[in-house]
Amino acid sequence: MSAVKKTSQTSQAVGKSSKFFRGVWAELKKVHWPNRSELITYTTVVLVSVAIVALLIWIVDSALTLALTRILK
């Protein structure tokens, strides 16, 4: 491969990368970033939801364990 062809491919790769990152930056400017109050609210909702789902899974798991233990005795 000639030096001109390698330089051309490198130049194209840099150009594509540059265009990609400019596009990413433009999209990030469009994002609605939450303020501190919203962030705390969203985080609380997620943590409470996870705790509720974990509790439900624990209850169902315990019930099934108890049922299978009694069946297998």
Image (cartoon, rainbow, N blue to C red):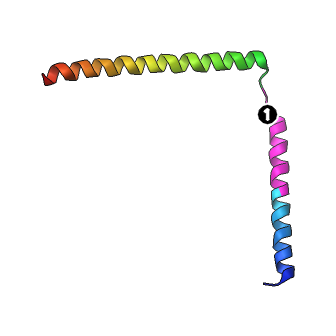
* x, y percent for residue 2: 82, 84
* Horizontal relation, residue 60 to residue 12: left or right: left
Secondary structure type for disc 1? loop
Q: Is the magenta stretch mostly helix, strand or loop?
A: helix
Q: Is residue 56 above or below residue 8?
A: above
Is 29 magenta? The answer is: yes
Q: As displayed, is residue 17 above or below residue 23? A: below
Q: Residue at x 86, y 74 (%)?
A: 7
Residue at the extreme left of the image, as rendered: 73
Residue at 61% from the left image edge and 17% from the top image edge? 45
Residue in view at x 81 percent, y 39 percent: 28
Report the residue marked by disc 1. Answer: 31
Horizontal and vertical percent for residue 53?
47, 20
For the residue marked with disc 1, what is the amino acid? Val
Rendered-image quadrant of the N terminus: bottom right
Query: Is 41 within the magenta?
Result: no
Quadrant of the rendered image containing residue 8:
bottom right
The picture places residue 27, in percent across and down from the top left corner, at: 81, 41
Q: On screen, 33 above or below 21?
A: above
Q: Is residue 44 left or right of residue 64?
A: right
The image shows residue 56 at horizontal and vertical percentages of 42, 18
Report how many numbered discs are placed on residues in the image.
1
Circle 1 Cα neighbour tier, 10 Å, few/some/many (<14 / 14–19 / ≥20) = few
Q: In which quarter of the image is the C terminus?
A: top left
Q: Could you tell me which residue is drawn at 39 percent across and 19 percent down?
A: 58
Q: Quadrant of residue 55?
A: top left
Magenta segment range? 18-33
